[in-house]
Image (cartoon, helix red, strand yellow):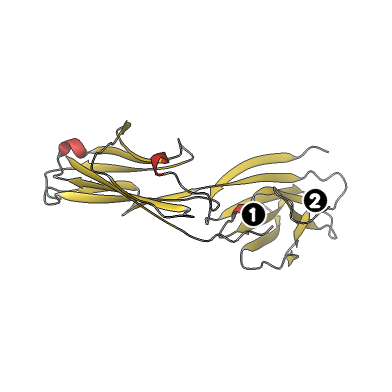
Amino acid sequence: MTVQLLLIVFSITITSIGGTSHIWNINEEIDSSVSFRCEIDELNPNAVITWVYRPKIYKIKGVKWLPLYANARRLTQDNHRYIVDYSGYNEKTKKYLSILSINQLKLSDEGIYMCKSNQYQSIASLFNLTISPSMKILPNDGIIELNRVQRSINLSCIVREVSMNTIDPLHLKWYHNNHEIKNSQSIEKLFKHENQATLHLYIRHLSFNDSGLFKCVYDNGKASKNVQIFYTSSGK
């Protein structure tokens, strides 16, 4: 197996905006989507289910909770990223259901999201959202099956930081069957103010020994993705 690593780093601008409860901790990647499911028992006809948000970093002095939705009524100006599916009463679960979805997640979305009824003694549901770096593998993660005709493959690991922090190229690594792939011929190209990096893994002269699990890891597991490669000589 002949392996060559190529690291390319470039910049992308991220725009930032500034009783007993059930609490769920949720972590999602930057630019991905998330949905919070809120179920509430028995409501009177005039009851209102509200969604509010407390940002991790306060941008407005004195503001603790920012309103998002009251039932299906939108209270936020960002109608493209925040969507509520208010289904009302569900006969099967015997509960009222409201689902808040957020698209194209930003670092500024980190914080606590609360769903609660204005009904007396209603128990709130809280979701603690944190944002992590995104990662993807090209041509794809999951499973790749190679045949005897294919003699080489190029795997690209793309990671994006949640802020404009510079990505240290030494923190982005490829592993094969839990062993780090090291190559003296690796080529690194760095630019200033980068928050996205691509680490290319070139495998030439493919053989059966190249089968197995390839993993790209960023910053000791801050983000990671796997691809399983099966190499056969069957020609399928």
Q: Is residue 18 left or right of residue 161?
A: right
Q: Assign a secondary structure to mark 2.
A: loop
| Residue 214 occupies quadrant | top left
Q: Disc 2, disc 1: CB below 8 Å?
A: no
Crowding at mark 2 (Cα within 10 Å: few <14, some 14-19, many 20+): few
Can residue 94 be seen here? The reply is no
Mark 2 highlights which residue?
A: 64
Q: Nearer the viewer, residue 193 or 155?
A: 193
Q: Picture coordinates of residue 231 (x, y %)?
A: 19, 43
Instruction: Report, in whole angstroms, how far the alpha carbon at label 2 lies from the one at label 1.
Output: 15 Å
| Dot 1 alpha-carbon crowd within 10 angstroms: few under 14, some 14 to 19, many 20 or more | some
Query: Which part of the image, by quadrant, shows the N terminus?
Result: top left
Disc ID at residue 108? 1
Q: Is residue 34 above or below residue 231?
A: below
Q: Position of residue 149 (x, y in %)?
A: 11, 51
Which kind of residue does numbered mark 2 sit on? Lys
Q: Residue at x 24, y 39 (%)?
A: 184
User: Of the residues shown, which amino acid type is indicated by label 1?
Assistant: Ser
Q: Looking at the image, which residue is at 48% across and 53% down?
A: 195
Which residue is outermost to the right? 120
